[in-house]
């Protein structure tokens, strides 16, 4: 009886850790909606700063293009406020690349806020934590607000913009790969450069690297999105197995096959958590490379980096760090419970012999068969 109480006590501790690690996955689901779940615990935050000359020129060009796109949306009759001249103010136009905006990015969504309030939150789909996908989705969200046709379909237009961006990225990548070494007139029209050998269609390395970088971000975050979904599924499956395991202990059942999936799911969950935490950390380090350089230590070449983003670690990443350590200790306790679960049958037999003296145990001495001598009789 004491042995059963000890097993239930250990299982209770394991159940507490199991439910805790499952609840710590809930912050990963935030930053997806403004109305249903107005909470955001991001993995990281970023803002567009543009400190270097190259970044300033790039951001300035994008802002002018978005302003032109806003004017086009209004002048083509898509806006419902044509009689109001204030709609042409910069405050009412697309401000995706404004330095006042801060984007809180999570695995399944993001939030956009400024210095005073959170503007909106939206799910990012399988784009995950792709920062370029976040910016494109924000452009679609603001276009829908300027349009009467898509005024109530913000998510639809945002998804369409991201889908178009992904198709354009794949097409550009294929175009550069096929036409990089060819004398192609279309390449010279799109890029506007001529190579050192005088051939048209020369693709500068900056274009090629930029497209490859954006394409790598897209593919990485798509794979990472499904991997994160798989990890959360393993966590839910582990909770179910722990409840079944506790039921067998409470009812004093012996299901030895249960230990195999329990150990397997535990190891898979710990491995997935290790990969998730490590990859997220490496992803943040890679994004840090796009931050402005330290001007106090910089002497020459002030524009050797783009200096495009400003990255900070979010509360969701810290919660993931705590969850990972809980899962590590949870794995150790699980294997301890499984080991005691296997040896419990011997202990139960010993306790049953003490409580019931008439308990029959198979005798180790085997009965000897009664052989009969069939040889010739001996007579004197």
Image (tube, rainbow, N blue to C red):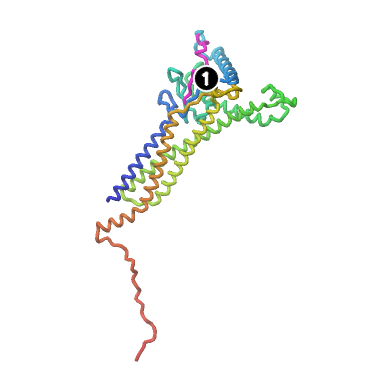
Q: Residue furthest bottom?
A: 380
Q: Position of residue 187 (x, y in %)?
A: 69, 25
Q: Position of residue 176 (x, y in %)?
A: 66, 29
Looking at the rendered structure, the secondary structure element under dot 1 is loop
The answer to whether residue 109 is above or below residue 93 is below
Nearer to me, 159 or 100: 100
Please state if 258 lies on the left or on the right of 350 as rendered: right
User: Circle 1 sits on which residue?
Assistant: 96
> Which residues lie in the magenta part?
86-104
Which of the image's four quarters has the C terminus? bottom left
The answer to whether residue 8 is above or below residue 375 is above
Residue at left offset 35%, top offset 90%: 379
Q: Is residue 97 magenta?
A: yes
Nearer to me, 54 or 255: 54
Nearer to me, 154 or 279: 279
Please state if 148 lies on the left or on the right of 3 as rendered: right
Q: Residue furthest right?
A: 198
Q: How many marks are shown on the rendered structure? A: 1
Q: Is residue 134 magenta?
A: no
Q: Position of residue 264 (x, y in %)?
A: 44, 46
- Residue 371 visible in the picture: yes
Residue at left offset 36%, top offset 46%: 245
Mark 1 Cα within 10 Å, few/some/many (few <14, many 20+)? many
């Amino acid at each position: 009886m004491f042995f059963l109480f000890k097993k239930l006590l250990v299982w209770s501790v394991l159940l507490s850790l199991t439910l805790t690690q499952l609840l710590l996955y809930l912050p990963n689901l935030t930053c997806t909606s403004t109305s249903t779940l107005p909470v955001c615990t991001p993995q990281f935050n970023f803002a567009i700063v543009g400190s270097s000359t190259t970044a300033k020129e790039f951001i300035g060009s994008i802002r002018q293009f978005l302003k032109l796109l806003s004017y086009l949306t209004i002048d083509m009759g898509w806006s419902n406020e044509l009689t109001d001249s204030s709609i042409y103010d910069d405050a009412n136009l697309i401000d995706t690349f404004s330095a006042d905006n801060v984007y809180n990015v999570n695995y399944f969504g993001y939030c956009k806020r400024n210095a005073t309030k959170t503007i909106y939150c939206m799910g990012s789909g399988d784009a995950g934590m792709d920062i370029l996908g976040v910016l494109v989705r924000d452009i679609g969200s603001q276009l829908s607000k300027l349009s009467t046709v898509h005024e109530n379909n913000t998510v639809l237009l945002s998804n369409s913009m991201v889908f178009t961006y992904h198709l354009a990225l794949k097409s550009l990548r294929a175009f550069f790969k096929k036409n990089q070494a060819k004398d192609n007139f279309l390449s010279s029209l799109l890029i506007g450069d001529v190579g050192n050998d005088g051939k048209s269609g020369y693709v500068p390395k900056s274009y090629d690297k930029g497209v490859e970088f954006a394409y790598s971000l897209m593919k990485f975050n798509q794979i990472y999105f499904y991997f994160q979904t798989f990890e959360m599924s393993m966590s839910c499956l582990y909770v179910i197995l722990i409840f079944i395991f506790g039921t067998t202990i409470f009812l004093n059942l012996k299901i030895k096959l249960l230990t195999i999936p329990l150990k397997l799911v535990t190891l898979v969950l710990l491995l997935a958590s290790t990969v998730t935490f490590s990859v997220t950390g490496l992803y943040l380090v890679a994004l840090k490379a796009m931050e402005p350089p330290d001007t106090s230590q910089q002497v020459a070449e002030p524009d050797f980096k783009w200096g495009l983003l400003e990255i900070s670690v979010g509360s969701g990443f810290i919660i993931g760090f705590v969850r990972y350590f809980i899962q590590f200790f949870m794995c150790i306790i699980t294997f301890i419970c499984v080991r005691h679960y296997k040896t419990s049958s011997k202990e139960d037999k010993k306790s049953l012999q003490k409580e019931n003296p008439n308990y029959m145990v198979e005798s180790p001495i085997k009965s000897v068969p009664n052989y009969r001598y069939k040889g010739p009789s001996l007579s004197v």
